[in-house]
Amino acid sequence: MSTALTRMSTTDLELAVRAAREAGALLKHHFGRDAKVDEASHHDIKLALDKESQQLITRILLEDRPDDALYGEEGIAGNQQSPRQWIVDPIDGTVNFYYGIPHFCVSIALRVGDDVVLGVIHDPMVGETWTVERGGPAMLDGRPVRASARDTLEESILFVGCGKDEEALRTGIERFRRASVRARKMRMMGSAALGMAYIACGRLDAYVESRISLWDIAAGRLLVEAAGGRVELTPVPSSPDAWSIIATNGRIPIGEIL
């Protein structure tokens, strides 16, 4: 079969899954080994492996879709005039990865015009892959999943992110305090994309953070909404493609603690 025919026969979702899984295999291979730190701040770490993972994803996607654009945490690639844009987080949960905590993932979404039309979130350590296409069901390893039916804060598990700047930290910690007295359990897990994937399959009931980047949540938003949940995004005025997010199973009264 010719290369051209092979490319034409590969769907966008199949391509995204392949890219996510190959990047995940790279991360799993390096997990637990010494990782080169490219940049470190008080609240964050950038690894050389972040760039290597994005380069691998970029090669896979753009070799098959050479006219597309790519926008990722580690920079842009491809035809930036294209209406088709891949949105990539090559390691969501880099700090977890660096410290040997096996809770991180690869997140890939495809935006056409203003609409995200597919998403893939792959956890290489557990070996789980969430997929979604606009208009279709949220899937975990090929099986449809739904957000939880829990409808009270007292029976819910909430994931609260605190962000990195001073204001976001204050907001996140105060939300954590207020929610702690109402929810069954609170979690700060370190990966926004996995948090949203967990909402989509009913493991968590809500995720709240006052400042998060597009590549962290693009795939997760579509996944949560397809699973029956709800996602509210509010732009952060000072930062393009940064958002305040409230993602829920669509049932619990999250406004009572915000």
Image (cartoon, helix red, strand yellow):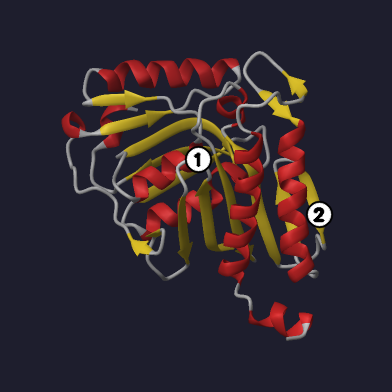
Callout 1 crowding tier (Cα within 10 Å): few <14, some 14–19, many ≥20: some
Q: Is residue 28 above or below residue 135?
A: above
| Of 205 and 130, the residue lying toward us | 130
Question: What residue appears at the point 17 percent right and 33 percent down from the top-left corner?
Answer: 155
Q: Position of residue 30 (x, y in %)?
A: 66, 35
| Of 21 and 109, the residue lying toward us | 21
User: In the picture provided, is 112 more to the left or to the right than 125?
Assistant: right
Q: Position of residue 210 (x, y in %)?
A: 50, 30
Residue 67 quadrant? bottom right
Question: What residue appears at the point 79 percent right and 50 percent down from the top-left corner?
Answer: 76
Q: Position of residue 80 (x, y in %)?
A: 80, 60
User: In the picture provided, is 258 more to the left or to the right than 69?
Assistant: left
| Mark nearer the viewer, 2 or 1 | 1
Q: Amino acid at mark 1?
A: Met
Q: Secondary structure at mark 2?
A: strand
Report the label total.
Answer: 2
Q: Is residue 154 above or below residue 137?
A: above
Residue 59 quadrant? bottom right
Residue position for label 1: 125
Q: Is residue 70 visible?
A: yes
Residue position for label 2: 77
User: Looking at the rendering, in which quadrant would you find the C terminus?
Assistant: top left
Q: Amino acid at mark 2?
A: Ala
| Of 130 and 1, the residue lying toward us | 1
Question: What residue appears at the point 21 percent right and 32 percent down from the top-left corner?
Answer: 153
| Of 40 and 55, the residue lying toward us | 55
